[in-house]
Image: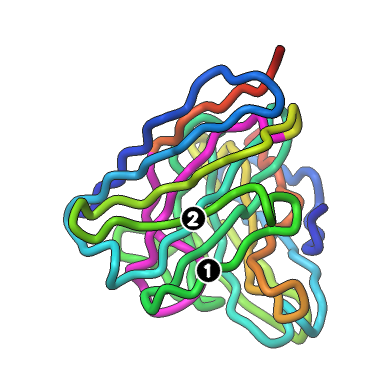
Amino acid sequence: QSVLTQPPSASGTPGQRVTISCSGSSSNIGSNVVNWYQHLPGTAPKLLIYSNNQRPSGVPDRFSGSNSGTSASLAISGLQSEDETDYYCAAWDDSLKGYVFGTGTKVTVL
Amino acid sequence: EVQLVESGGGLIQPGGSLRLSCAASGFTVSSNSMSWVRQAPGKGLEWVSVISSGGTIYYADSVKGRFTMSRDNSKNTLFLQMNSLRAEDTAVYYCGARTVPTGLADCWGQGTLVTVSS
């Protein structure tokens, strides 16, 4: 049972900007950093954003992360066909004493 | 280059046991936070367990008391001992390592499939 809520789907045309939200609570996003992952089922998850808004080396600057209170967002600008896959947020939860993932968002490039 | 290779998955009957391994290269398992996550068929990612560099281990409630995470520093390998397996444990299991300063893992293996079925 995920405690981080994401929209099930998001879409855009090539070149557009898409934003994915991740809603949590004071025990997770409100007090701990958020990571964002890109995941094609059956393959290794790929870290896009860590510490709310930091990009690992090799991740294009089209991907950006932000936080506000108990919510986080991932923005994908200049949408490309290869961005069509699943995206998850994740954070430590102080109450559960464990990591929690978001419900996941499937991005479709129209 | 950081590399993680999982093994040990397979078909197992309900109530059975399996031990997953995650062989690491390019970094030291004992110096980094390491995690297991899984993805059941048609479902999202689910965190399973984490071991800190200091050796503290946490488990998801869904596996607590049945799964045991450990590491062998001499082999630079992470393990997940899974007992009393249930149908709902059927999933692809991924091991991950954190080499960035904070948060869940940034480097992941390709995964190993565990199928619990009679």
Position of B58 compared to B54: left or right? right
Q: Mark 1 is on which residue type?
A: Ile
Q: Residue at x 66, y 42 (%)?
A: A107
- Under circle 2, the secondary element is strand
Up/down of A71 relative to B80, above or below: below
Q: Which residue carries the number 2 mark?
A: B69
Cβ atoms at labels 2 and 1 below 8 Å apart = yes
**Residue A85 in which image quadrant:** top right
Give the position of the C terminus of chain A as an image quadrant: top right
Query: How are the colours assigned in the image?
Result: rainbow
Chain letter, disc 1 residue: B
For residue B57, which numbered disc appears in the image?
A: 1
Residue stretch rendered in magenta on the structure: B89-109
Question: Are tags 2 and 1 found on a single chain?
Answer: yes
Chain letter, disc 2 residue: B
Q: Residue at x 66, y 48 (%)?
A: B66
Position of B56 compared to B71: left or right? right
Tell me residue B52's x, y (percent): 44, 73
Up/down of A58 relative to B54, above or below: above
Q: Residue at x 18, y 57 (%)?
A: B74
